[in-house]
Image: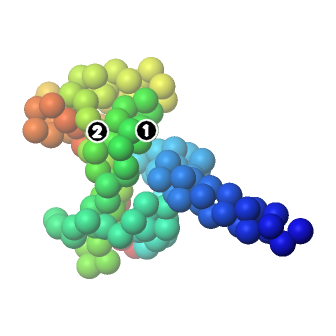
């Protein structure tokens, strides 16, 4: 009996880091919903969530905490490069991601997977959805998707 317990503990400990690397099953509904402005933005909760399932932010810059989601992490079928959430001192509550696709491809993929259309808001490189989220060209080969609200 004593030999089975350590093996069971070992298998349980092996499973926890694997789950943490890939992230929880709540990632797309929670993060995706907030990014598309379907849900409210709670920066404190989102920062804690990202720390719990990934790791501490790798930088704090531009009033945001920046996280690496891990290799191969996708959202709406598009690879993620970074996730950022507003820092405590920001007058805005926001959540955003850097997508590893061009603006046109990211726009098309989000329309096909989520049914959310982004229309020109400020020229051809800044697009906005009816719900208020933004899709902007970033470094010509990447795209930022974010939702921003004034803090209450």
- Which secondary structure, mark 1? strand
Residue 3 in view in this figure: yes
Vertical side of 66 occupied by 139: above or below: above
Q: Residue 103 in the image: state x and y as whole percent.
A: 22, 29
> Pointer 1 and pointer 2: residues touching (CB < 8 Å)?
yes
Rendering quarter of residue 150: bottom left
> Mark 1 sits on what residue?
75
Q: Residue furthest bottom?
A: 89
Residue 134 in view in this figure: no
Query: For the residue carrying disc 2, how many other residues have a C-alpha within 10 Å: few (<14), some (14-19), or many (20+)?
Result: many
* The disc label shown at residue 60, or none: none
Residue at x 38% of width, y 39% of height: 72
Residue at x 25% of width, y 30% of height: 101
Of residues 5 and 15, the one nearer the viewer is 5
| Left or right: residue 39 compared with residue 98 | right
Of residues 83 and 136, the one nearer the viewer is 83
Q: Quadrant of the C terminus?
A: bottom left
Answer with mark 1 or mark 2, whichever residue precedes in sequence. Answer: 1
Of residues 53 and 132, the one nearer the viewer is 53
Residue at x 31% of width, y 26% of height: 107
Vertical side of 92 occupied by 35: above or below: above
* The disc label shown at residue 99, or none: 2
Mark 1–mark 2 Cα distance, whole angstroms, equals 9 Å
Vertical side of 102 occupied by 84: above or below: below
Q: Residue 118 in the image: state x and y as whole percent.
A: 32, 30
Q: Residue 106 in the image: state x and y as whole percent.
A: 30, 28
| Left or right: residue 119 compared with residue 45 | left
Q: Quadrant of the N terminus?
A: bottom right
Q: Residue furthest right?
A: 1
Residue at x 46% of width, y 71% of height: 48
Q: Residue 125 in the image: state x and y as whole percent.
A: 14, 32
- Which secondary structure, mark 2? strand
């Amino acid at each position: 009996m004593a030999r089975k317990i350590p093996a069971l503990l070992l298998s349980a400990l092996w499973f926890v880091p694997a789950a943490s690397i890939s992230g929880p099953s709540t990632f797309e509904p929670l993060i995706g919903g907030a990014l598309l402005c379907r849900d409210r933005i709670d920066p404190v909760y989102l920062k804690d969530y990202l720390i719990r399932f990934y790791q501490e932010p790798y930088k704090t810059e531009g009033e945001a905490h920046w996280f690496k989601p891990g290799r191969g992490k996708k959202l709406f079928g598009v690879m993620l490069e970074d996730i950022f959430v507003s820092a405590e001192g920001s007058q805005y509550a926001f959540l955003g991601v850097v997508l590893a696709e061009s603006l046109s491809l990211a726009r098309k993929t989000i329309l096909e997977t989520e049914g959310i259309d982004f229309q020109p808001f400020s020229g051809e490189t800044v697009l906005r959805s009816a719900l208020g989220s933004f899709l902007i060209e970033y470094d010509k080969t990447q795209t930022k998707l974010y939702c921003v609200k004034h803090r209450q």
